[in-house]
Image: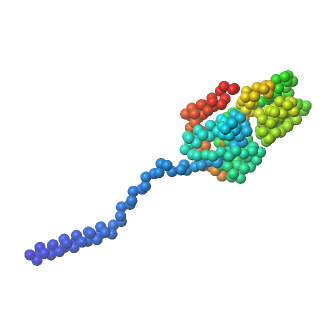
């Protein structure tokens, strides 16, 4: 009888000991909160552009910035899952502003050059354009690059690759304008003999302004690879843009945008 009582006492003590241990055990971790699908994207890109370069970027009658580059950026944002905002700014100084961090990137029919690579990074090329000459319809003496001697006045947009190329490679009298339309107005007024710019830009402008009475002469005399310029301190922006660009080139979206703006006019 005493043995049975002793065993019962031991069992009771063990039960108490188990309960004490259970009370000291750490609580199970709370389940992690579900991901918020409405959370803001991890990346927002501030994009500088000079909306004076139809058909790549320009302001329409409703004061909206539209164009090939604008549609391209929208497609990149959708493919890459990021947001963006445009800042319309002057071309002159746009790369200094980018390098100083006023923008994260610039998309504005920007030609990739070694000089520009010293201060900004570039995405993979997204467009290949070439410089061409435009003259008035009644001009029969200027037929191409070889016609640009020291008596020929050529209008260009200040600071563009057309400006640089003509200065370095011809003896023409280069006259610089803040915007390309001003150079073309000077052509119409016969203040310059020719204008040089990228083929798609000139082609679009002449098609939209038949009253100017101008034409493109000769073949393109440069290769112009356009890229999106990115602040060197923003590698995550460069990576996101390159990845999105590869996506839209692979799924046909890029081709749709290109056809919208250039297929009918080339």
Q: Is residue 65 above or below residue 11?
A: above
Q: Residue at x 62, y 40 (%)?
A: 73
Q: Residue at left 68%, top 46%?
A: 87
Between residue 50 and residue 144, name the one nearer to us: 50
Q: Give the image location of residue 228, x and y in percent.
A: 66, 42
Count how many numbered circles sit on residues in the image. Answer: 0
- How far across and down, in percent of the image, does residue 139 sit? 85, 24
Foreground residue among 11 and 95: 95
Q: Quadrant of residue 221?
A: top right
Q: Quadrant of residue 195?
A: top right
Please identify the quadrant where the C terminus is shown.
Answer: top right
Direction from residue 254 to residue 28 in the image, left or right: left
> Coloring scheme of the render?
rainbow
Percent coordinates x, y for residue 110 in the rendering: 71, 40
Residue at point 71%, 35% (across, down): 54
Residue furthest left as drawn: 1
Quadrant showing the N terminus:
bottom left
Residue appearing at x 57%, y 36% in the figure = 248
The answer to whether 224 appears left or right of 189 in the picture is left
Residue 96 appears anywhere in the view: yes
């Amino acid at each position: 009888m005493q043995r049975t009582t002793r065993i019962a006492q031991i069992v009771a003590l063990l039960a108490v000991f188990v309960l004490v241990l259970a009370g000291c055990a750490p609580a199970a971790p709370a389940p992690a909160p579900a991901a918020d699908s409405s959370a803001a994207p991890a990346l927002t890109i501030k994009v500088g552009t000079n909306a004076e370069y139809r058909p790549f970027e320009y302001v329409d009658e409703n004061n909206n910035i539209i164009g090939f580059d604008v549609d391209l950026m929208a497609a990149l944002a959708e493919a890459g899952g990021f947001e963006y905002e445009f800042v319309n700014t002057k071309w002159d100084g746009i790369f200094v502003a980018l390098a100083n961090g006023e923008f994260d990137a610039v998309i504005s029919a920007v030609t990739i050059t070694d000089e520009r690579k010293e201060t900004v990074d570039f995405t993979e090329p997204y467009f290949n354009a070439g410089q061409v000459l435009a003259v008035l319809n009644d001009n029969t003496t200027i037929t191409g690059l070889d016609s640009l001697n020291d008596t020929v006045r050529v209008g260009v947009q200040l600071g563009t690759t057309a400006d640089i190329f003509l200065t370095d490679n011809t003896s023409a009298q280069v006259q610089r304008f803040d915007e390309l339309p001003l150079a073309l107005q000077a052509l119409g007024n016969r203040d310059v003999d020719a204008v040089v710019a990228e083929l798609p830009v000139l082609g679009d402008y002449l098609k939209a302004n038949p009253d100017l009475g101008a034409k493109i002469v000769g073949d393109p005399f440069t290769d112009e690879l356009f890229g999106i310029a990115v602040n060197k301190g923003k590698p995550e922006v460069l990576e996101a843009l390159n990845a999105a660009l590869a996506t839209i080139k692979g799924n046909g979206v890029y081709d749709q945008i290109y056809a919208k703006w250039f297929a009918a006019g080339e």
